[in-house]
Image (spheres, helix red, strand yellow):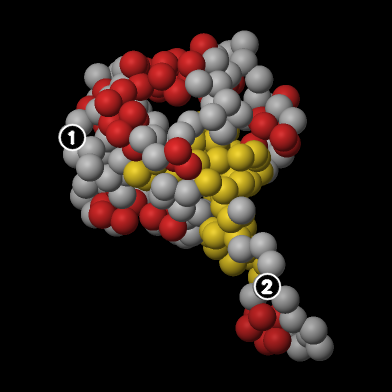
Amino acid sequence: MTELLDLTMTVSSGMPVLPAHAHTCVYPTSSHEEMAAMGRPSTFAVEGLLMSTHEGTHVDVPYHCDPSGPAVTDLPVSAFTGPATCLDLTDVPSSELIEVPALERATVAPDRDVRAGDHVLLHTGHHERSYGTRDWFRHTGLSEAASRWLAARGVAGVGIDAPSLDSSRETRRGVYPAHQVLLVEHRIPLVENLVGLRQVAGRRFRYIGFPLRLEGCGGAPVRAVAELL
């Protein structure tokens, strides 16, 4: 029997968001109690949702950073699923960049190598350590050299358990090497705010992360899942 592991952040009102993004709000538009009070024989609940396309577990596609790049609806669903590996990078401090030597150390074992067509997930441990704390937006990320190392191996996607593939140290300076190299130059989708990567660190599996079909958008929420092989 196939085992599926959920790698998706729970969406809730008031969840931490980047300063420039819309705040998340999940609110009732109809409730069982209201319907019952109206004397309805059958009741139902309906909710409304307000959120940024780049909060919670979500995918970035090229249009996010390149006005000539494809939006979510321009890419086939096959772009968001495929063979995957998860690299254990928990030894990289939040204040430092993920550099090429760290990637090489994480891929020493034969079953942990990065192969062409892989979706590569980066387990930094940041979500486990810092979600809900003042350190949530202080995180590691890929250097330019590390981004090029992954692109050179023909990966199909890259994901991380932090708010961005670019480190907070870089984004505070307005620099986005991972997005520029992977997303803009190589058209590789990026997944951010993954959770539970400890479950798949050092393993091979199938990644599934289909986005909502949002027309003209540079990103969208996904339900990220690992299918164990």
Q: Quadrant of the N terminus?
A: bottom right
Mark carried by residue 211: none
In the picture, measured across the screen, residue 1 lies left or right of residue 173, that is right
Q: Nearer the viewer, residue 11 or 8?
A: 8
Q: Is residue 139 visible?
A: yes
Query: SS of the residue at dot 2?
Result: loop
Quarter of the image where one finds residue 63? top right
Mark 1 vs mark 2: which is more N-terminal? 2
Q: Is residue 131 visible?
A: no
Q: Which residue is mark 2?
A: 45
Kind of residue at badge 1: Ser
* Residue lying at 74% horizontally and 81% vertically, measured from the top left: 43
Residue 25 image offset from top left, x and y in percent = 49, 55
Q: Nearer the viewer, residue 6 or 119?
A: 119
| Foreground: disc 1 or disc 2 | 1
* Residue lying at 61% horizontally and 46% vertically, measured from the top left: 206
Residue 111 image offset from top left, x and y in percent = 47, 42
Mark carried by residue 95: 1
Residue 185 image offset from top left, x and y in percent = 52, 12
Query: SS of the residue at dot 1?
Result: loop
Vertical side of 16 occupied by 93: above or below:
above
Kind of residue at badge 2: Ala
Quarter of the image where one finds residue 186? top right
Q: Please say if the residues under marks 1 and 2 sit with CB atoms less than 8 Å apart.
A: no
In the picture, measured across the screen, residue 47 lies left or right of residue 65, that is right
* Residue lying at 72% horizontally and 25% vertically, measured from the top left: 74
Vertical side of 45 occupied by 101: above or below:
above
Tally the numbered discs: 2
The CA distance from mark 1 to mark 2 is 44 Å
In the picture, measured across the screen, residue 91 lies left or right of residue 185, that is left
